[in-house]
Amino acid sequence: MSLRSFGSAAGLLAFLLIWEAISRSGLVATTLLPAPSALPAALRSEIELGFWQAMVLASLNHYVIGLVIGSAGGIAVGVAVAMFPRFEIFQAWIARVLRPIPPLAWIPFAIIWFGLSEAAAAFIIAIGIFWVNYFATQAAVHAVDKDLIELARAFGHRSLPALLRKVVLPAAAPGILGGLRTGLGMGWMTVVAAELFGISGIGQRMMEAAGLLSTEIVIVYMLTIAMLYGLSDTAFVAMQRRLLQWQR
């Protein structure tokens, strides 16, 4: 184990010990701050009752749908804005008006349009992820060396699909992939809030547990979100390295 890894592990262990000590000291009620030692039993109970599996699968379902729609839409519009100046001018004020509106502000419309369904949650998630990918892609494509594009045209790659395939997307790939990675985290931050209004998933289960003062269950699902994000981020980084091997 490297010194850096050892220091990180020691810091985490110290944090857990302090948390355990505060919970056991009686200074804070266990309903407000359950001890870390109470979490494994809470997780086991949730798994045995089938709640944990059902909530994770429900959240993953609309998370993936929102991730795919938001990422694909953001990248497509970002490329179009960067490649076509007239389209950039046309949509500039639309983006400025809509971008500051947080995804959660769309919840009333999501419920009106889709009801309390997975489609509503996916819609809210997609909005947050869309803007992340939109701006990352726009900036990445704008940064592509214009001389490379002219050189590609000189060698006969004059059509838009050819330019995108041969020059623009490969050159902009690091920035686009950076936006996709940021969108992974944005999606998990949004998914729980989208479920707080009765849509099945981790957020709904956390609200139910909080209403019963079962805060150990709330923390179990908070850590579940962290685990899911960590796994997805690790997998994405591995894929990103493979896709960008040509740059090394």
Image (spheres, helix red, strand yellow):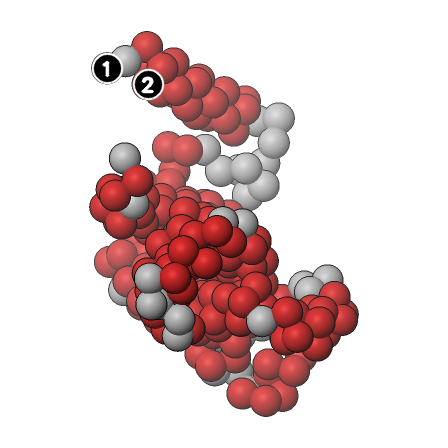
Assign the N terminus to one quadrant of the image: top left
Give me the residue at 58% from left, 71% from top: 84
Q: Quadrant of residue 106?
A: bottom right
Horizontal placement of 97 versus 60: left or right?
Answer: right
Would you say residue 56 is visible in this rendering?
A: no
Q: Marks 2 and 1, Cα distance to the nearest angstrom?
A: 6 Å
Residue 9 x, y percent position in the rendering? 35, 20
Residue located beneath label 1 in the image: 1
Horizontal placement of 163 versus 191: left or right?
Answer: left
- Is 162 or 237 nearer to us in this picture? 162
Assign the C terminus to one quadrant of the image: top left
Give me the residue at 37% from left, 41% from top: 39
SS under mark 1: loop
**In the image, residue 33 above or below residue 195:** above
Give me the residue at 61% from left, 31% from top: 28
Residue 19 x, y percent position in the rendering? 50, 26
Would you say residue 123 is visible in this rendering?
A: yes
Residue located beneath label 2 in the image: 5
- Is 40 or 241 nearer to us in this picture? 241
Give me the residue at 76% from left, 71% from top: 93
**Type of amino acid under label 2:** Ser
Residue 52 x, y percent position in the rendering? 32, 59
Graded by Cα atoms within 10 Å as few (under 14), some (14 to 19) or many (20 or more), the crowding at tag 2 reads: few
Horizontal placement of 56 versus 135: left or right?
Answer: left
Q: Are marks 2 and 1 in contact (CB under 8 Å)?
A: yes
**In the image, residue 99 above or below residue 113:** above
Q: Residue furthest top?
A: 3
SS under mark 2: helix
